[in-house]
Image: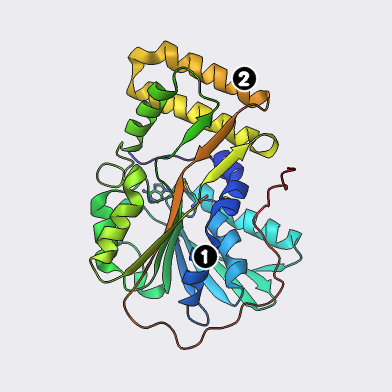
Amino acid sequence: MSEEFELDWLDLREPHDAAARSEALAEALIARLPARPRLMDLGAGTGSLFRWLAPRIGRAQAWTLVDQNREMTEAAFDTIADRAEQVGLKVTFPNRRTLLVHAPGGAWRVEALIADLAHAPDNLPLHNADAVVCSALCDLVSVPWVERMAAAMRVPFYACLNVDGRDRFLPPVPGDAVVARGFARDQGRDKGFGGRALGPKAVAEIARAFGARGFEVQSAASDWVLRGGPATALMSELVFGHAEAALAQDRRQGAQISAWRERRLQQSSLGRLQARVGHRDVLALPPEAGWDEAPAVAPGLPAMAPALPRRRR
Ligand SMILES: C[S@@+](CC[C@H](N)C(=O)[O-])C[C@H]1O[C@@H](n2cnc3c(N)ncnc32)[C@H](O)[C@@H]1O
């Protein structure tokens, strides 16, 4: 059974994801892309990674957003078009399947592919990609999935925002350990990719599988650090999610888990809750030499990912 994700959840996390992803790793990926790169975004959802990465690449580029959920990819097209227009970029639809964002450095072409990634890479046109990218996907996949991808890939693989298990809510309250234990167990549940989900082992497994095939692997922390105001809604959802996962794993502790949830929600509504969700981004670069040209990024491109307000010190 594959995992369902809510549009609202992806909306809520987008600005926090944008603030958390490692700029250094994205730059290392961009340095290995050709003049007009073709990127395949696995589990693209509503296109959050496109909105963050495309302006950083800057130049003409083509994206294939892959997801099993048609509603997500329709929302991706709408959101990309809206955000691009909001920052003054013209958007056209040359046909029913293609969206073009007309940026100063060249057009950003976006197409969608509806596919069940459980069967990847057999059902993916990898020969048409200069890089395979994904955001918040690889903690759902399994060891055999990573093995198959590593064996098939000849281009950079970039996977950002993989959970690493270093979640923490502050201040400490009774029930933290029970919830953390249940949540950790739930992360290993089969999420529809042919085996136990990698959860916090995602980056280590990617490093092992791609490293064994001669890829150079680097990784960097991309934690969410959440406190007060703009993070309140996301923290409340995290509290619900942790409690629900822990309950599913250990019904006998139901009363303690429910009490934990109510206490944490109250702290969140009073602005007294802080949370850290540990993530890591990982980049695997193939052994071949890089591209000869290193095209310059068009200057001054507007960001399409929503920014978080600056926190007052
Ligand atoms: C956590 S969301 C991340 C979405 C997006 N990358 C982002 O960062 O906002 C995971 C995405 O993977 C997709 N997904 C999960 N299992 C899938 C599968 N078996 N085949 C294709 N897509 C899948 C979901 O529909 C969802 O859009």
Indicate the quadrant containing the C terminus: top left, top right, bottom left or bottom right: top right
Identify which amino acid the numbered label 1 is placed on.
Ala
Q: Nearer the viewer, residue 259 or 77?
A: 259
Mark 1 or mark 2: name the one nearer the start of the chain: 1
The residue where tag 2 is placed is 266
For numbered disc 2, what is the local secondary structure?
A: helix
In the image, is residue 68 above or below residue 25? above
Outermost residue on the top side: it is: 255
Q: Position of residue 85 (x, y in %)?
A: 73, 62
For numbered disc 1, what is the local secondary structure?
A: helix
Q: Mark 1 to mark 2: distance in Å?
A: 37 Å
Q: Residue at x 60, y 77 (%)?
A: 59
Left of 301 or right of it: where is 274? Answer: left
* Disc 1: CA contacts within 10 A as few (<14), some (14-19) or many (>=20): few
Q: Nearer the viewer, residue 111 or 193?
A: 193
Specify whether residue 142 is in view.
yes
